[in-house]
Image (tube, rainbow, N blue to C red):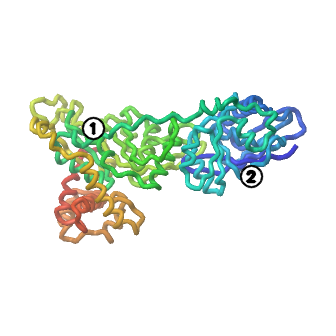
Amino acid sequence: MGLGRTFAVALVGLDGYLVEVEADISQSLPAFVLLGLPDASLNEAKDRIKSAAKNAGIPLSRRKITVNLVPASLPKKGSGFDLSILIAALQASGDVRPSGRTVFLAELGLDGRLRPVRGVLPAVMAAVRHGCADVVVAGANAAEARLVPGARIRSFATLAEVLLDFGADPGQLLLPSGGQATAELQESVPPPALPEPDMADVAGQVEARTALEIAAAGGHHMVMVGPPGAGKTMLAERLPGILPDLPDHQAMEVTAIHSLSRTVGQLTQLIRRPPFESPHHSATGAAIVGGGSGVPRPGAVSRAHRGVLFLDEAPEFDRSVLDALRQPLESGSLVIHRASGSASYPARFQLVMAANPCPCGMSGGKGLECVCSPNQRRRYLGRLSRPLVDRIDLQLTMQRISLADIAAGDAAESSSKVAARVHAARAAQRERLARWGLDVNAEAGAALLKKELKPPRQATADLDRAMDLQVLTGRGYSRVLRVAWTVADLRGLPSPDRDCVGTALAFRQQVKAA
């Protein structure tokens, strides 16, 4: 009896760590010992592995099998270690040849089939980064694994096929007949994507459409306050349709997050369109920010990375949930700490919030009388804290649409026309911000905006006056400058003029917040 060694990957957040799986068979009473901080689901692998090996035709040794997952100090969880543990045990008993630095990522069924696991994309990325380009996965994970440049992927439907590929005796193996098992695990063809909502559907609301275009062009956050039926939700749902496709490095980030958080279906291609997340207002802090037992899972803010997080009826969310957004809005990332460990996730999203002006929604309208007291109206919008609202670049008050707006709806611009201007503005930003490693104006820091990107003094006269009158905070001053640069990019100007700054300042209407 000897020692077997294979490799797997442990994911902590999106960070993958190479795990060396050692198996030793000793002359002792039958037992299966698993070491190296396995969680409950990983401890269950012992029984899955025994049944899978027996049904593949090569049962495990009847001696004591000790498996050690190195480094032992790193917590390990999930069923993705099944295949690597079994191959290491069979190497120790001499039933298969050594696999070198091949990484194994698959769950085992009791009948010996290889089942897909979550997080294959970030796991394969980590394997390649650590110099292990040869990866074995389940057939249903093959297309996703092959998205990683430099990876050499081998996929199988059953354990018997894996063992045959690694030198097991064909006479012992119980191979599937006629490729039946392979056919069962073939990837389903994804349904055709539905067309994105079009801006041409929005009647009236010229000012809101302009604000949405500015938000798309510069990656700015936005809040809309208005009565029911004004078009707040319609506008928010059309924001992804005017955003440009994600470049390769951003698409890889987004796809890795969705690979980790997806529970059904397999990814077959990179996610190129900016994601859109719209959680219900009853969502908890863990659902929005991320969390859960064990190593924290990504929440809605991370699933919306490089896309849009839309909070409809924002004042109905728990205030602590809303305030938890303040840190990722500033940093573009999240580090979630739990007793069992911490996990880091990217969270650079566009926040769009929609709110009624009062609980009944009729405040400020004509014809329909508001039934809310002044104190109720103040408390309602007061659920949006002032520190949160101060981080929102575009703050807009909307009115009800009129019959004339509906009649003129056919003349509204389509998403394709708006998207063309957004694309041109983004190209100008990339060219200007490339030397600082930034993509959009919303990522520009206060120091950059007050030095290298500071507009001429005559252009910021109104902004400076607002600051002197203490209408703006220091953060608000910088955010107005960011929006002014975006307005200039949309107009094709080399830098913001006084009108650009005035437009940005006009969209900085403070929402009443506590």
- Name which residue lies at 26% across and 41% down: 198
Q: State the residue position of label 1.
A: 233
Residue 328 visible? The answer is: no
Q: CA distance from mark 2 to mark 1?
A: 55 Å
Q: State the residue position of label 2.
A: 100
Q: Position of residue 19 (x, y in %)?
A: 68, 49
Q: How many marks?
A: 2
- Name which residue lies at 32% across and 52% down: 391
Q: Position of residue 88 (x, y in %)?
A: 76, 43
Q: Is residue 141 above or below residue 130?
A: above
**Placement of the C terminus among the 4 image quadrants:** top left
Viewer-side label of 2, 1 = 2
Q: Secondary structure at mark 2?
A: loop
Q: Nearer the viewer, residue 486 or 353?
A: 486
- Compared across the picture, whether 402 is left or right of 289 comes to left
Question: Quarter-wise, where is residue 116 in the image?
Answer: top right
Mark toward the start of the polypeptide (2 vs 1)? 2
Mark 2: amino acid: Gly
Q: Secondary structure at mark 1?
A: helix
Question: Quarter-wise, where is residue 410 in the image?
Answer: top left
Q: Nearer the viewer, residue 146 or 64?
A: 146
Q: Counting other residues with Cα less than 10 Å from the Cα at mark 1, is it few (<14), some (14-19), or many (20 or more)?
A: some
Q: Nearer the viewer, residue 355 or 70?
A: 70
Mark 1: amino acid: Thr
Residue 402 visible? The answer is: yes
- Name which residue lies at 51% across and 42% down: 268
